[in-house]
Image (cartoon, rainbow, N blue to C red):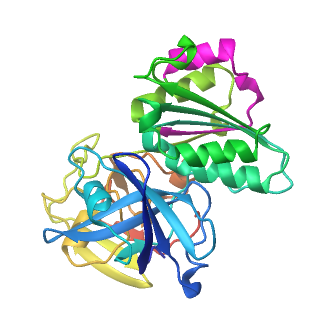
């Protein structure tokens, strides 16, 4: 179940002018609950100016079982991210959900693989966990990281990446791309886009060697990277994307869905609860929360999959989906933050555990 626990902030470390790493102390009784697959995220909850806010942040490391860390980069207009950077301090207690998310990779000691990570800006956060754990667990595997930033000064985890390179000098290749810093090589100047990846393929990197690729960053970069890697011969099933989102984006359904007065049965913790939608409700999740249900959610943008549930009966329309895989959709799973009922007999189950 997507449960929150109160965790104490063990330390807050500056990464850049705009970013910090927040490390939480995990009591021994909760260490199993906070065991994570590299690439997963934590959802933090806080009340600011009387409003409950939830935000997802990728886990960047867990040096020991009693600690878990996330990185937060303050963004313009980001109420939670600025609060996290400026006001969260050592010793504070925060509500933190147990690790969630499909993105990432679970290293296997017996595997010998060749992996690629493409990150821009704070998209490096889940990659740090994936790269470090893979190189540590799989002694015969190799990783190439293409990392885009404005400049070397704006790089998150600059020292951590340097330490990784020192630890695995022959197994880790780091290619830094700077958009606002002059370099000797034109190849390493600019932004990560389709043209840049094609140039790297021509002069520096053999993309055909990679078994898996992980991509995280702004949407435009990710879309171009995905299309370019496909064009360079990488199969779609080997490409794994972690999308950012902007919470509060209004839901856009493909066609008008009439929900006024519609009733939906929500199953949670073995109990059924009937909710009634109004014309103002943008999703089943919104309606349920408005009527007092304590359902799991985080981003409300169709990205994190925290609000995933299974449709047991009826049909729903889902506006956006950035996280559910085709097999999950085929099995009846939907994102409740994006779903509205199309029929009058909809039953959704938040207890369904068929696909983690």
Find residue 96 and report its horizontal and vertical position in percent. 41, 72
* Residue 340, image quadrant: bottom left
* Residue 266, image quadrant: bottom left
Residue 104 shows up from this direction: no
Left or right: where 18 falls relative to 37: left
Left or right: where 43 falls relative to 146: left
In the rendered picture of this protein, how many numbered marks are placed on residues?
Answer: 0
Residue 72 shows up from this direction: yes
Residue nearer the viewer, 110 or 145? 145
Q: Which residues are magenta?
A: 193-216
Left or right: where 32 falls relative to 249: right
Query: Is 201 one of the magenta-colored residues?
Result: yes
Residue nearer the viewer, 77 or 36? 77
Q: Point out the image quarter for the C terminus.
A: bottom right
Residue nearer the viewer, 259 or 328? 328
Left or right: where 228 falls relative to 281: right
Find residue 296 and report its horizontal and vertical position in percent. 38, 70
Residue nearer the viewer, 60 or 321? 60
Find residue 143 and report its horizontal and vertical position in percent. 71, 39
Whether 26 is drawn above or below 250: the answer is: below
- Extreme residue toward the bottom, this view: 29
Query: Is 173 one of the magenta-colored residues?
Result: no
Residue beneath the point at 62% across and 18% down: 200
Find residue 142 and report its horizontal and vertical position in percent. 77, 40
Whether 248 is drawn above or below 220: the answer is: below
* Residue 56, image quadrant: bottom left
Residue beneath the point at 43% across and 36% down: 153
């Amino acid at each position: 179940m997507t449960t929150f626990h109160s965790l104490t902030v063990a330390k807050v470390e500056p990464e850049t002018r705009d970013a910090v790493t927040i490390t939480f102390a995990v009591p021994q009784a909760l260490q199993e609950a906070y065991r994570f697959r590299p690439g997963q995220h934590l959802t933090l909850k806080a009340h600011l100016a009387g409003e409950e806010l939830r935000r997802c942040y990728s886990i960047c490391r867990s040096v020991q079982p009693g600690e878990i860390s996330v990185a937060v980069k303050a963004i313009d207009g980001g109420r939670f991210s600025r609060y996290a950077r400026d006001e969260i301090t050592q010793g504070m207690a925060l509500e933190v959900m147990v690790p969630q998310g499909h993105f990432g990779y679970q290293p296997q000691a017996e595997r010998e693989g060749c992996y690629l990570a493409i990150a821009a800006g704070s998209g490096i956060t889940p990659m740090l966990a994936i790269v470090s754990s893979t190189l540590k667990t799989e002694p015969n595997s190799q990783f190439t990281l293409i990392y885009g930033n404005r400049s070397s000064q704006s790089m998150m985890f600059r020292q951590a990446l340097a330490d990784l390179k020192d630890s695995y000098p022959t197994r880790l290749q780091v290619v830094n791309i700077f958009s606002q810093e002059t370099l000797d090589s034109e190849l390493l100047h600019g932004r990560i886009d389709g043209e840049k990846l094609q140039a790297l393929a021509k002069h520096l990197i053999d993309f055909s060697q990679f078994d898996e690729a992980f991509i995280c960053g702004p949407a435009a970069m990710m879309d171009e990277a995905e299309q370019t890697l496909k064009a360079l011969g990488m199969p779609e099933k080997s490409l794994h994307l972690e999308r950012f989102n902007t919470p509060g984006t209004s839901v856009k359904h493909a066609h008008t869905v009439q929900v006024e007065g519609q009733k939906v049965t929500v199953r949670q913790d073995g109990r059924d609860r009937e909710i009634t939608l109004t014309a103002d409700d943008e999703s089943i999740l919104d309606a349920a929360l408005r009527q007092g249900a304590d359902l799991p959610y985080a981003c409300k943008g169709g990205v994190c999959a925290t609000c995933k549930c299974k449709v047991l009966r009826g049909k729903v329309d889902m506006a956006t989906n950035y996280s559910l895989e085709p097999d999950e959709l085929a099995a009846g799973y939907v994102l409740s933050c994006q779903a509205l009922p199309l029929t009058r007999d909809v039953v959704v189950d938040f207890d369904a555990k068929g696909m983690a």
